[in-house]
Amino acid sequence: MAFLSTVDLEQRAGPAVLLNRVNLSVEKGEVFAVIGPTGAGKTTLLRLINLLDRPSAGDIYFDGEKITDPSRNAVHVRRRMAMVFQKPAVFNSTVYENVAYPLKVRGGHGKAARSGVYELLDTIGLGGYAKRKAKTLSGGEAQRVALARAVVTQPDLLLMDEPTANLDPGTVKMIEQLVMQFNRDRGLTVIMSTHDMQQAQRVAGRVGVLMKGELVQVGRPDDIFYSPGNAGIAGFVGMRNLLKGNVIRNESGIAVIDVNGREIEAVSDLRAGSAVEIYIRPEDVVLSMPAPAGSARNNLRCTIRSVAANGPLCTVVADCGFPLEALVTGRSAAEMGLIPGQEVYASFKAAAVRVLPSMPA
Amino acid sequence: MQELWQALVQAVNLIVSLDPEVIEISLRSLYISAASILIAALFCIPMGALIHFHDFKGKRVVINVIQTFYSLPTVVVGLFVFLFISRSGPFGGLELLFTPAAIIIGQVILIMPVLTGMAIGALSGVDKAIRDTAISSGASSTQAMRAILFEARFAVVGALILGFGRAISEVGAALMLGGNIRGYTRVLTTAISLETQRGELVLSLALGIILIGIAMVVSVIMNILLQRY
Amino acid sequence: MKSLVVYRVHRVSITILIACLLLGTILAGCAPAATPPAATGQPSADNKSAQATAFPVIPGTPRFKIATTTSLYDTGLWNYLEPMFEKKANVKLDIVYAGTGAALEYGKRGDVDALVVHDPEAEAKFIADGYGINRRSFAFNHFLIAGPAGDPAGIKGLPPEQAFKKIYEAGKADPTKVKFISRGDNSGTHSKEKLIWQAAGLKYEDVQKSGPWYVEAGKGMGPCLLMASEQGAYILADISTFLAYKGKVNVAPLIEQGDLFLNVYDVMAINPEKVKTAKMLPTANTFINWLMSDDVQNTIATYGVAEYGRPLFNPLKGGGCTEPGCPKLADYTVPVK
């Protein structure tokens, strides 16, 4: 049986449905990421698991017990879990007292407990901060304190609600590493929500996609990343090129699809006549001049519409009969001298094209 | 104007010479006001928490009513309580009129609105996330309430000092309910009232200075205790 | 979750409130007092009174409460007499300072056990209604009319009724020059004042409404004297308070002779049969007899002599009061049983 599972979990607020028949299953010792856009219901879901709110319908099972049973003492269940929130909330006292708070409410004041707190402060890189007033910490430091506070009691389950949403990259990395360290060393099961797909890929063993209150896809990060279940998921995980077309013909597993008058070849079993949606990852599109490069089956002549810097990379949108987005390194863009109006060749493999039957309107 | 200077001199004299009647009156003022604030706080702070954390129809109205009662005229409260505890009133058998207990009752009623209203204000100032943090850290509901009150401690202590101030400077109800009996229910404010009526202006001012001095000491002590935590 | 927290808090706070009210009440009964609590083993009269008050929630000292008029209080006579009585009768004497009107009200409600007042008409009614019993007189003095030394209304040496008539006319004509401060508080002094207006042929309501020259202060004797001094007004005052305040006020005595000026101080107990909550009759009787005793009468005879050159009050003992209107011998010598 799964360590933590929800059965047909529903949450309503008035007429609005926040969660719709969510069936989640998390194994002991894994790091599970729940991803989805803002407003998808991630926070709602985590709060229900932590028994901060009661569900409108459905049940939650934790380590074999039905914890949504009203007769069950919520405090005891919560004491086996811990939660880190998006905004780090610290008490108006010292760092030590913040981290030691969960121990205090359980009555643990002993010497062993105290040294545990100091050790933990060292682990999170805030050794020596024990007597500092917690309100004087930066956002990143405060969130680390919140994390330490969460794990100080050796919980069985750690819940994290977009814990790095507002932090600088350095702190984000530190926190991700701490989470993975705690998961490895203590066998701590982690359920973390995030809107950052890359973070999920870095940290999680499995990912669940939550959209408009429904759990639409569960799998390993790569599965979601490269084989999104539908257009919505695809858009969310960064598939920028979402096109509609019709299969003209299919030759031994290679479908030729008409998109706005241009032909694209993709790996698919779909028959001729099927209406399809296709997705291409921008980084799978290669731009070259004056002639196409490589052995890709798809080579299209396009005109550049826009070039935008994107950190060390460059997002190039080209008109190939349909809009196509490509991601190239800034250096390549500079070397090729890509500017709007220029003619380029866009190439991509047939295998890079994901094909799904069109959703009914 | 020279009365002010004379008053200051006399105040110092009275304190330094440990004038027994002044000491007795001051201690009684202190005791009665402290008792009033403690009793009121034990009720009003949880009551304020109850109103703050619970959403119910008419919550705004309740808060408005509480704030209206900030301006309760003290003599009216005194008269009201008098009718209850007079020997011919419903609680006459308790023999409370003209005792310090009567003054405490009157003062408790007077400062209850202020304390409750300020407690609600203090709790409103605490981030809602604190409650979630406490609860998800495994706190029971009482433990969470304590954590939130602790977070609001500066504002709560401010409210207590305000309530104490209102109690110790209160005259109307103290006169009506205590009777200003020498050696039993005479407090600083009623003594000031009496001496002013008698034309002893310097003595009245001196007593007033002592009263303010007491209020200051109390406020300072409470703030020191706060800083410790 | 939220409602659970809140419901528990609600119950807890109500319980705590009730506990604290009870606790506070009990504690307050043990508040610091200036003198030690009454001891046991007293003369029989006081044992009864101690037991009579054994019922109340607050344990301990029986307290004997009296209401007294302001003129007796402002002269400091009570400060002197209070410890004497407390030692003699071994009870705590609580003196509540109120005008005759308020004092009678406290008496009717049983909030005090005895009254010391000086308003014969009101007292008579009080006794006739059954509230007061065992009335005795124990001291007397006189009223006087005082006013600005310049005497703008020209009343010096006149009989009181004529003086009042002149003040009335002059005040109505020019309120900035001639003013009168009235107690305005249903006290004994106020009643005497009304009597004099009546003797002057004026209806009191007319006087009240006739103009800003007539000021109803609503305060005690001492404070009214201060006010008269501030405003340069005429005032009817008792000689004792007047003397006691002489150094602080700027009014001159203008008329000191007149039958109407006699002012007798009476004491009476509250009748426990009419006022069920008055419980200390034995102590009240002791108090009344004590006021008529040699000790007190001698004290009254000498009180104030050192400071003012003459006693502030006159004892009745020894027949010192010889004018018309003085109380009969029985009223100030026959002890109460």
Image: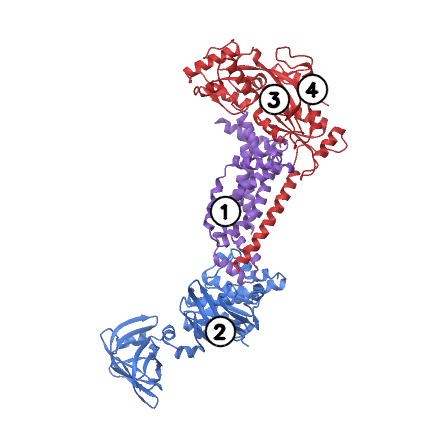
Chain colours: A blue, B purple, C red
Q: Quadrant of residue A152?
A: bottom right
Q: CA distance from mark 4 to mark 3?
A: 19 Å
Q: Which mark is residue B118?
A: 1
Q: CA distance from mark 1 to mark 3?
A: 50 Å
Q: Is residue A338 left or right of residue C77?
A: left
Q: CA distance from mark 1 to mark 2?
A: 45 Å
Q: Position of residue C315 (x, y in %)?
A: 66, 16
Name the foreground residue: C26 vs A345. C26
Identify residue for label 4: C292
Q: Quadrant of residue A325?
A: bottom left
Instruction: Find out whether the residues at labels 4 and 3 contact each other: C-beta distance under 8 Å.
Output: no
- Amino acid type indicated by mark 4: Met
User: Closer to us: mark 4 or mark 3?
Assistant: 3
SS for dot 1? helix
Looking at the figure, which quarter contains the N terminus of chain A? bottom right
Q: Position of residue A219 (x, y in %)?
A: 45, 78
On screen, residue A12 above or below B222: below
User: Closer to us: mark 3 or mark 2?
Assistant: 3
Instruction: Find out whether the residues at labels 1 and 4 contact each other: C-beta distance under 8 Å.
Output: no
- Amino acid type indicated by mark 2: Leu
Identify residue for label 2: A24
Q: Which mark is residue A236?
A: none
On screen, residue C58 above or below C130: below
Q: Position of residue C194 (x, y in %)?
A: 52, 18
- Amino acid type indicated by mark 3: Glu
Question: Is disc 1 surrounded by few (<14), some (14 to 19) or many (20+) residues within 10 Å?
Answer: many
